[in-house]
Amino acid sequence: METRETSAEPALEISCDESGWEGSNFAAANSDVIAYASVRLPIEAAEECIRLLRGRSEWHRHEFKAGHLIRNTDGAGLAAFLGPDGPVHGRARVHLTHKSCFIILRVLDIFLGDFADTVSLGLRPDPRLASAAAELCRTGREVFGPERWRAFLAAINLVLRENRHPKVHAPVDAFFDQVDALRPLAGDGWIGELFDELRNARGDGYTARIRLLDNHVLQPVLEPLLPALARTVLHWSAGTQPIAIVHDEQSALTEKRIQRLEQVLAEPPLELISRPIQGPFLRFRQTDSRIEPRVQVADVLAGVTRKIMSGGAVAASHPGLTDLLEPYLEPASCWCGWATDPAL
């Protein structure tokens, strides 16, 4: 790709944080939703936003979090924050990841899709597999029953996971044993056909697992923050404006992974950004959110979004909040359109 100057203006500074990331054990997580928020606010505006949100809160000496806003205000307070006259309206974006949907898509990707979704940081998923993953996420519990479904998700998580003493055969065997056990319940429709396709992929399962382990440093299959960050960069940059990300401290977003993200976005087959003549297109620095008000605003937005989209008490008590969130949501989120009840 020919390198050319993208913009004479300085990099656009965006502040980001997430809510709901709990490590790589997705199947046993407390929440099935990750919300990744980005905001474009001057520091002064962010400081004023946090000051107004705090009000007379007893939390004035501590970092202000989404939980404080939810506990200390009613639905009207949340609506004021998210609504058209609120401090972040038109200045923020939220990428959603439904954890079960994410790991289902990734297991289909590595066994049936030749790692297309993983290698492209979620930007080039196989449309057929993405649709199948979303539909299976919506219907799997009902088709197979809660206990079998939880066992299947646990087997998916195990085969995708890289740990301190990685194994090849046992996780692959455990996953395909689950596929065999569930196949009689899958019926003769598309779910049955999908499980037949998975069963036929068993012969290459060890090879796929080895590839997963070999490439886990730069191509981690269980890292949803990288696809979320990729979509965030594309949204704010429109492919031409260099971006400077100010991010809460997050061990998953290493310097090498950030460099690879820019490389994937810039080079074939994607070619979604145009690199400047000098310097990186994507600048990235991590900071303590307690001292960075813009990151605190992103954190509050991410936490509020996760609570609402998780389908729990907040959404049930204030159903109008879901509509207020819609302008913020990234259309290409990894989202099956179905939120789990945290009590399940």
Image (spheres, rainbow, N blue to C red):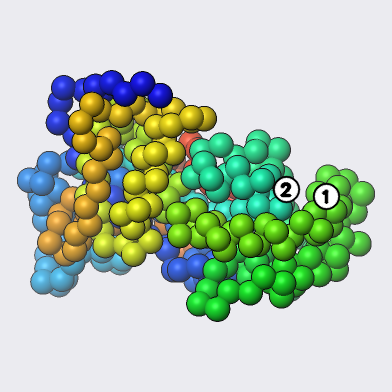
Mark 1 — residue?
A: 197
Point 48% across, 30% down: residue = 268
Q: Against 113, is 276 above or below?
A: above
| Crowdedness near tag 1: few (<14), some (14–19) or many (≥20) residues, C-alpha within 10 Å | some
- Regarding residue 334, the answer to whether it shows in the image is yes
Q: Against 185, is 169 above or below?
A: below
Q: Nearer the viewer, residue 56 or 137?
A: 137
Q: Is residue 94 left or right of residue 313?
A: left
Across and down, in percent, residue 273 comes to 37, 29
- Regarding residue 69, the answer to whether it shows in the image is no
Task: Assess whether mark 2 and mark 1 are in contact (beta carbons under 8 angstroms).
Answer: yes
Point 71% across, 53% down: residue = 111
Quarter placement of the N terminus: top left
Tag on residue 112?
A: 2
Point 39% across, 44% down: residue = 261
Quarter placement of the C terminus: bottom right
| Crowdedness near tag 2: few (<14), some (14–19) or many (≥20) residues, C-alpha within 10 Å | many
Q: Which comes sooner in the sequence, label 1 or label 2?
A: 2
Across and down, in percent, residue 98 comes to 54, 54
Q: Against 15, is 30 above or below?
A: below
